[in-house]
Each structure stands twice: as structure tokens, then as C-alpha cells.
Amino acid sequence: MSEQKKKYHLETLAVHAGQEVPESDTKARNVPVYRTTAYNFDNSQHGADLFALKVPGNIYARLMNPTNDVLEKRLAALEGGVAALTVSSGTAAIYFTITNIAKAGDEIVAANNLYGGTFTQFDAILPQQNITVRFTNVNDFAAVEAAISEKTRLVYIETVGNPALGIADIKKYAEIAHKHELPLVVDSTFTPPTLLRPIEHGADIVIHSLSKWIGGHGAGIGGAVIDAGTFNWKNPKFALYNEPDRGYHGLRFAHDLPLNLAFILRLRTVGLRNQGPTLAPDAAWIFLQGVESLPLRVAKHSSNALKVAEFLAKHPKVAWVKYPTLSEPELAKQYLPDGAGGMVVFGVKGGSAEARKLVDSVPLFSILANVGDAKSLIIHPASTTHSQVSDEEQRKAGLQPELIRLSIGLEHEDDIIAALEEGLAQI
Ligand SMILES: *Cc1c(COP(=O)(O)O)cnc(C)c1O
């Protein structure tokens, strides 16, 4: 991208970044979907040069696709990173990021207020591969310090935790991680880049589930990893970057490639090329349509959600409400000055039974396990998304039995509030 483009505002980048126009042959204005498995070589020498990484170019669509490439460049521009990689889901983005840094015998330190699927991956799957995860309460920095050891390879947080919506103090996490020469990995799914850009606060790697607000219409599954390009992978404790890679002719990623691209290039070659979590170009195209309206949509999600939170806070049948701007105003001012996103959680008086009754009584809202749709969504996490998490772990992560999670959509705010009022009248 040219220097001039870099100075564009986020709204402009959301529409233009990453695409060269006119599209070389067809002059198609919108990004085409490249439905191909492989790409022609000009001749056998060109093929040999591509395989030897002597010339840039497309080889095979498991590891590169021009549609995905535009999305990757656009997301990198929006987050302020040097490069990005798209993968088949947010879950894959997390798993392949962790295993692009840590190997058997290593440890990671993570906040405990994570997306349910991430918690299970960290708690049940990574240990099977001998990667140990040390969980700590969010923003308990003494506990983070205590959990870091010689074996730690990264610190992992979510910007706004799920489901209790606690705001991570990213700057403090970055300070501690960097003091110990560790990268800070941040899942920013709940806070798309027009609300919060973790790299500006010191994060090294940013992860998104594209399935949520970035896609924005509940129309597909995808994930992305964005690299700030600032971390020093030459530190010998990162064996995956400093020891010769048997799968790549003895390449040493931190030494034989540009250091600021080592992480993403390893993720593409070892992750995509040899483990295969490729994002289909059709899905990448859907996410590109979403990104173009992301700034507008996220502003509306945020203002609707704030109004819902204020309504619920005054309702006599509601025991408590959490919305980042209301529950943690200081951190919200620092990290979310332009709005706090579309999630609202609250507890009804009367516990789990009343909570489930309310879920069944609210019109307009869809009962389902997703967030970030244009449509308003409702769920009772304790009996669904977090039911694999033990009662004790649920309590530690701030998940009470009466908690209801709302993902506020783009409908008119009066209709959303009227639907909640109608549901609450029935419990
Ligand atoms: C949905 C979600 C994920 C997982 O993403 P998928 O695309 O569903 O695999 C990870 N983190 C957060 C915060 C999410 O909301």
C-alpha cells in the first residue's frame, strides 16, 4: 500500500485497502472470487523459482488466494499491523497462533474470562499436546507475573471478555509480557478495529473471528491473525523460529526471512501449507462485503447496546447489568472511547429458571449461540455455550447462573427495547 493510502481514515481503508484497481484483466470493480485450486506457471523455470521462494506468486490455493489476499491486507491496514493471514475459523486462528509460537513442553499464560470454545481448547486440547495453560483472573497482574516461568511463550487475553464483558487493561498486559520478552496475543473479536486497535496499546498479535461483527450478517465462518511485526523472534527460547525447520529445507524463520514477517510467513507455510486450515475464497468474499460497512455497523451496534443496557439497569426485574461503558467507565474511557460494541449481559432476579423463561419469552431476538449478527440474539450461557465449563470455573470467569447474554443487532432501538420489555413482563 502506498504511503498516501496509509494516511486514510479507517472508514476509507475499510472500503479500499488491499485492492489494486482496476483489477488487472477484467477491470472488475468489486473484488472477484478466485475459485481455483491451483495457478499456472509460465514455464518449468517459473515453477521452480516459485517453489524456491525466489519470485513471489501464487502456487496452490491451500496457502494463497487473491480474494483472501485482499481481505488480509485490508485487515492488516485496519488493525495497524504489517501482515495478516486468514484461516477457516476464529477457533483455527487461535489454535494455529498458539502452535505457531509454543511447542510441546512450553507454557502459556491466559486470562480465564475467555470465549467458551477457547477456554475448552486451552483447558482440554492444548494439554494433550503437552502445552500447559496457566489461567489467571483478568487484570490480576500479580497473578500474571507469578504464572510466568522460563517455559512461558506468550500471554493471551480477550479485549472484552466473554461472557462477563470485563475490559482487559491491554497496556499493562503488554508491559508485563514485554518485560519477560513474551508476545501479547489478543483476541479482539468483541471489539472490531473501529472501536479498539490492540496494536496501538502494545499487542503483538491480534486475532479475530470473522464470523462475528467483521462479517456482520451471520453468513459464514472464518478467522484472521494480524501481526504488529514488532516482536523479536530471535530470542532463542522461541525454538520454532531459531532452530532449522525440517519441513522447509532447514530454514530458520527468525534468521532467513525478514524478522517482521517471520510470524505470518511461518503461519502461512507451516500452518496453512502443511496443516491446512484454509479459508474458502467465497467466505473471504462475504467478509470483504462486511468489512466495507463495518465502521457504520459497529457504531450502530454500540449505540443500540448502550440504550438497551440503560433500559435494563432501570428495570425492576433485572438484578444487575454489565455493559463496558457503564460497568468499567475508567477502562472504557481509555480503550473504548468510540463505543463499547454490541454485547450486553444481565442477570434477572430469580436465578437460572427465570433466566431461561425470559429467553423463551422475548420476541424478535433469535435464541442461538452466535454474536455479531445484524439480528439481535439471546442466549443463556450457563446451560449452553459454557455448559462444558465446570461450575467452579464458570464462577471464576464471572458467569452466574442467572446471566443472560444479548448480542444487540441493527434493528431500531425502540423495537429491541419493546421486545425485552414484553419478555420481562412474562417472568
Ligand atoms: C466466536 C468467537 C471465537 C471463535 O470463532 P469461530 O469463528 O466461531 O471459530 C473466538 N473468540 C471469540 C471472542 C469469539 O466470539
Image: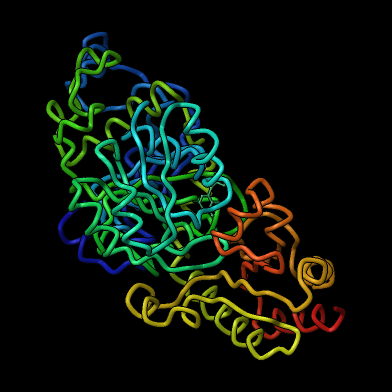
User: Does residue 19 appear anywhere in the picture?
Assistant: no
Residue at x-position 14% and y-position 34%: 234
Question: Which scheme is used to colour this image of the protein?
Answer: rainbow
Q: Is 203 in front, or is 43?
A: 203
Residue at x-position 28% and y-position 36%: 151
Q: Is residue 365 toward the left or the right of residue 88 in the image? A: right
Q: Is residue 195 toward the left or the right of residue 405 in the image? A: left
User: Does residue 195 appear anywhere in the picture?
Assistant: yes
Please determine whether, in this image, residue 276 is positioned above or below residue 27: above
Q: Quadrant of residue 191?
A: bottom left
Disc tally is 0
Residue 385 in the image, given as x and y percentages of width and height: 66, 52
The residue lying furthest to the right in this view is 426
The quarter of the rendered structure image containing the C terminus is bottom right
Q: Quadrant of residue 332?
A: bottom left
Q: Is residue 331 toward the left or the right of residue 322 in the image? A: left
Residue 81 in the image, given as x and y percentages of width and height: 26, 52
Q: Is 77 in front, or is 151?
A: 151
Residue 337 in the image, given as x and y percentages of width and height: 37, 79
Residue at x-position 32% and y-position 61%: 141
Q: Is 195 in front, or is 388?
A: 388
Residue 245 in the image, given as x and y percentages of width and height: 25, 18
Q: Is residue 86 toward the left or the right of residue 199 in the image? A: right
